[in-house]
Image (cartoon, grey):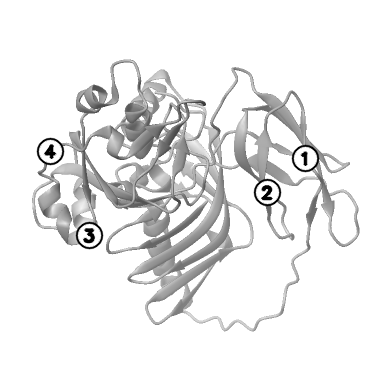
């Protein structure tokens, strides 16, 4: 998952490595992980399909098997302590998919002198708090989400910038949505105006301690989905009653603008026809986002959370949730459930950009 955005305007590039076709049971996916220097098999390497709940661990022969991989395009990620992370785009389209061997390169550690003083813990704690807010966000769900192994993080500051590295995958527990996230952090660099983030996530469902908690997670997941980009895209692809009718029913309003200063006036214009930003291929029936300006989206069935106003230092009352997106490619293919395969295809701004890891749902989630 790669993200690159200006903090003030909150554009966000989210990676949903999502398939564009799916079978009920999925397919097995197998392969081998080797040491790049010796060619020997690497046991205990973690292998997963990014942003999904599908993953495996290599055995003593370096082999892995992921069961139930859906058909389509994914990013497959391989990590092991002491080795560089390997990533590869993979097409799942057959009864048995065998990927070529992953060859992991050992990490060469260089000695660095570290001066330890009494002020370091307090400074590190402040750095961790800033990192956590930027990574998870400050949403309601983020208050029940925490990094379980923060001690593996190393921070460096220069001027107003903060960079973070992690020697191992970060383990994140989301008690608001009922997931444990394993985050392979590749890059994190933040300043007052810009954040660059590169990482891959595997989801695992937590076991609820009671039916009450299970019901709370179901409600919170649905609420996280409602008003999201995926919810919006699924709505515009709905062919049962027509996208324009469905948009109104689901609480979405759309508008377009070329420059940011036009957003204030254009949001009150007539709703933008869906065919201005979405087209369907007549032969394949695939859906494509296709527009060359900003697409604004207002979700009127829910209000902004108060932390959103606080984060942006806004003194007004909470309003409807407003976001806008641009395309980083000429067109972006999406499936009927609002999922898309290209990692950097859509840049998100506004409310959608503020909702980050603490509000993410795995590929498998269906409302």
x and y, in percent, of residue 345 in the image: 46, 49
Q: Residues within 10 Å of mark 4 (few under 14, many from 20)?
A: few
Nearer the N terminus, badge 4 or badge 1? Answer: 1
Q: Quadrant of residue 211?
A: top left
Q: Residues within 10 Å of mark 2 (few under 14, many from 20)?
A: few
Disc 2: which residue:
88
Disc 1: which residue:
99
Nearer the N terminus, badge 3 or badge 2? Answer: 2
Closest to the camera, between mark 1 and mark 3, is 3
Nearer the N terminus, badge 4 or badge 3? Answer: 3
**In whole angstroms, how far apart are the C-alphas of marks 1 and 3?**
45 Å
Disc 3: which residue:
259
Q: Are marks 1 and 2 in contact (CB under 8 Å)?
A: yes
**In whole angstroms, how far apart are the C-alphas of marks 4 and 1?**
50 Å
What element does badge 2 sit on? strand
Answer left or right for 54 relative to 281. Answer: right
Query: What residue sits 78% from the left and 63% below the top?
Result: 106
Q: Are marks 1 and 3 in contact (CB under 8 Å)?
A: no
Q: Of 85 and 13, which appears nearest the observer?
A: 13
Disc 4: which residue:
270
Q: Of 267 and 284, which appears nearest the observer?
A: 284
Answer left or right for 283 relative to 89. Answer: left
Residue 81 can be seen, yes or no: yes
Query: What residue sits 30% from the left and 31% below the top?
Result: 226
Looking at the rendered structure, the number of numbered marks drawn on it comes to 4
Answer left or right for 320 relative to 44. Answer: left
Nearer the N terminus, badge 1 or badge 2? Answer: 2
**In whole angstroms, how far apart are the C-alphas of marks 4 and 2?**
44 Å
């Amino acid at each position: 998952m790669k993200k690159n955005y200006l903090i003030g305007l909150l554009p966000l590039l989210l990676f949903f490595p999502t398939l564009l076709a799916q079978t009920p049971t999925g397919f097995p996916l197998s392969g081998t992980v080797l040491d790049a220097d010796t060619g020997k098999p690497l046991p205990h390497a973690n292998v997963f399909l990014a942003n999904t709940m599908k993953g495996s661990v290599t055995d003593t022969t370096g082999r892995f098997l992921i069961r139930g991989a859906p058909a389509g395009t994914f990013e497959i990620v391989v990590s092991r302590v002491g080795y560089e992370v390997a990533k590869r785009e993979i097409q799942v389209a057959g009864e048995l998919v065998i990927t070529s061997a992953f060859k992991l390169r050992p990490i060469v550690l260089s000695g660095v002198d570290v001066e330890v003083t009494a002020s370091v813990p307090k400074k590190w704690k402040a750095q961790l708090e800033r990192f956590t807010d930027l990574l998870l966000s400050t949403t309601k769900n983020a208050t029940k989400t925490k990094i379980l192994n923060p001690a593996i993080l190393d921070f460096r500051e220069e001027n107003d910038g903060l960079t973070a590295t992690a020697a191992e995958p970060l383990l994140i527990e989301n008690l608001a949505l009922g997931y444990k996230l394993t985050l392979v952090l590749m890059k994190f660099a933040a300043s007052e105006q810009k954040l660059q983030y590169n990482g891959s996530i595997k989801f695992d469902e937590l076991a609820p301690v009671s039916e009450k908690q299970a019901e709370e997670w179901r409600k919170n997941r649905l609420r996280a989905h409602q008003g999201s980009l995926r919810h919006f895209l699924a709505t515009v692809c709905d062919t049962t009653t027509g996208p324009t009718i469905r948009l109104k029913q689901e609480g979405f309003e759309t508008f377009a603008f070329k420059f940011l200063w036009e957003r204030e006036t254009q949001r009150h214009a007539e709703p933008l026809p869906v065919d201005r930003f979405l087209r369907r291929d007549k032969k394949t029936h695939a859906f494509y986002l296709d527009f060359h300006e900003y697409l604004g989206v207002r979700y009127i069935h829910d209000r902004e959370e108060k932390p959103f106003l606080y984060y942006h230092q806004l003194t007004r009352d909470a309003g409807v949730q407003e976001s806008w997106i641009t395309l980083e490619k000429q067109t972006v293919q999406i499936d009927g459930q609002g999922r898309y395969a290209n990692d950097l295809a859509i840049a998100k701004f506004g409310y959608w950009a503020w909702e980050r890891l603490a509000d993410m749902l795995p590929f498998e989630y269906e409302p």
